[in-house]
Image: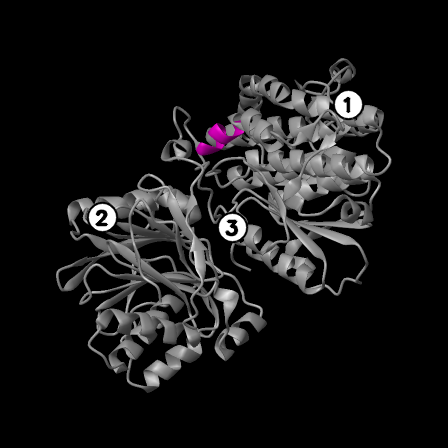
Amino acid sequence: MGLHTSNNSVLVVHGNLFARFTPVARACRQWQPSFPSMCGIVGYVGRSQAAPILLDGLRRLEYRGYDSAGVAIVNGDHVETRKCAGRIASLAKLISQKPATGSYGISHTRWATHGKVNDENAHPHFDATGKIALVHNGVIENYRMLKEQLIQNGDTNFRSDTDTEVLAHLIGNIYRQLDGKDSKARLVNATRAALKQVIGTYGIAVVHADIPDFIVGARRGSPLVLGVGKDENFLASDVSAIVAHTRDAIYLNDFDLVALEQDKFEISAIDGAVGEHAVSKVEFSAEDIKKGDYPHYMLKEICEQPDSVRDAMRGRLTYEECTAKLGGLNMNPAELRDVARVVLTGCGTALHAGRVGEYIVEQLASIPVEVEFASEYRHRNTPPTEHTLVFAISQSGETADTLGALRESKRKGYRTLGICNNVASTIARESDGGVYMHAGPEIGVAATKSFTSQLVILTLIGLLLGRMRQLSTAQGKRIIDALEALPGHIERVLKLSDQVKAIAKKYADVSGMLFFGRQFNYPIALEGALKMKEITYLFAEGHPSAELKHGIIALVRPDLPSIFIAPDDAVFSKNLNNIEQVKARKGPIIAITSGNGAKQLKDLAADIIEIPDVIDCLCPVLTVVPLQLLAYHLAVELGRDVDKPRNLAKSVTVE
């Protein structure tokens, strides 16, 4: 293990963990894990009091889990623990009533997988002696077997129902058996040995009451980042937790293990191999992840879409060639021309972006496109085809099922690219190339600006591939002009917020809503319904408009509004026919339209939301914004916790 001081001149540290494998590490690479829950970890070692820093970090990570929270701070020769079920505010109140002092410690906010949501199951957890404290994101799949072995060896003092406590006991058991006067090395080696016995996934932080100013961290399948400060170092599951203190970060790889002290840190692989890690500069600041004057992150991020859309295409359009420039794809023109099939895979909102992308790429580039649920893709026996290009779409770049699909695609020999918003994420690192979204931090659990950024990027991909095939320069220029006008159009749609708010109040007593769209806007019906479900908890379904008469019309009734996405496009008359069928059965209609659509809908729709007229392939970028606003305003009207909806976490890293 190499040693590095922690100061402003740090440039390079250790280890490509894939440089060398022990048999254990090779075995870990071969099994298919279930992935960890989206919890939050913050660790600190330095000269300041740890509690305020840990609490501040947890607040910034609360979108990752808010079932329970806790801290473990080493004070002298004992660990002071404060933990409770509930949100970070409950933990902060507990600490204010019973302060925890000390200059190093670890903390956690939980999204439960094993065990009920209660004080006992909240992290941190301890070994049998109470000296070793551990916080953990992930799932230890063989924890029952490990627990039985520990019990057989006389270790029976378990206080929780969690898999995490088993790992803490295992580390403690090994630590007590190891020889040597260097207690820091013993803790590192005990952690390393314990993790070699683990089947599953983890991001962990460990402290020992008898080892001052020392934290051990490790990751496998769950993100972990090291923050490098001056006379202080940080550990977190997301860089947003520590960006207020440092913007120098090292993103750990799977099987990495790190030992932190105030003024130095060491990184190696679980098997002891050493390589190199670059120190990255975090692109955003603490100000970027504040709500500002907005009541909720979701509204802030909806309103940021003119900028995020602009940033998604910044520097990527060329008028001279009437095409897009996407150097991050790492493909030369000949390779791009050879693409005969495109697969788009993702989950939730990212999957809906892929469904829009299917229409876009097929229209602009005349290439067959398939859209796959990432959760299904890696379990299917898809027939191999030559010249297939796969895109894994994920805002966080850490979505478990999407990462699994990416690995399966690469295993089958396909060139696999990523579309994500985190340049240091696992998907970004493991893909063969890709496109960075530049959307900035997205804190609200319900994805908004990341979705429209994904739509723009998929349009750029369609434009690039299309211009290499049948798309003319005139057509390419028309698309570029339309793309560059998008931010202004979104600003116009955002000015409709008060109108949408009034509609939300009007329908605040309904039990659900139906969403309909055709062609490019069918996936927007799916996305609108998802937003409604996520933050209002109302029943909502999205359908192709033409499916109305194939069963769905049985649901139409006066107290169930139907939202039709019906811009003045090539299929407007078809949408109009479906709207008339709903009207005839006394179903309330909310219509999103453009051009001359409002004039034709004025006697049919109870409420009409007019958006600017744009080319068909870009219309979804505009039609989705009123649906985001409708879900938001209705959730506020119903008193929902918009940014932290029940049972949800920002990024799903559990299978």
Amino acid at dot 1: Arg
**Of the pair 628 and 44, the residue shown nearer to us:** 44
Amino acid at dot 3: Ser
Counting residues from the N terminus, which is met first, the one under dot 1 or under dot 3?
3
Which numbered dot is residue 324?
A: none
Please report the residue visible at 54 percent of the width from the left and 67 percent of the height from the top: 33
Residue pushed farthest bottom?
152
Label 2 sits on residue: 51
Task: Give percent across and percent down for residue 31.
Answer: 57, 72
Amino acid at dot 2: Ala
Q: Is residue 301 visible?
A: yes
Local SS, label 2: helix
Which numbered dot is residue 425?
A: 3
Q: Crowdedness of circle 1 by 10 Å Cα count: few (<14), some, many (20+)?
A: few
Marks 2 and 1, how far apart in space?
56 Å
Is 126 displayed left or right of 198 in the figure?
left
Task: Give percent across and percent down for residue 114.
Answer: 42, 64
- Residue range in magenta is 297-302
Q: Crowdedness of circle 2 by 10 Å Cα count: few (<14), some, many (20+)?
A: many
**Of the pair 37 and 219, the residue shown nearer to us:** 219
Seen in the picture, residue 159 relative to 481 is either above or below; the reply is: below
Q: What color scheme is it?
A: one colour
Residue 325 sits in quarter: top right
Q: Crowdedness of circle 3 by 10 Å Cα count: few (<14), some, many (20+)?
A: many
Seen in the picture, residue 389 relative to 186 is either above or below; the reply is: above
Residue 593 sits in quarter: top right
Marks 1 and 3, how far apart in space?
34 Å
Q: Cβ–Cβ below 8 Å for labels 2 and 1?
A: no
Label 1 sits on residue: 478
200 magenta-colored? no
Counting residues from the N terminus, which is met first, the one under dot 3 or under dot 2?
2
- Quadrant location, the N terminus: bottom left
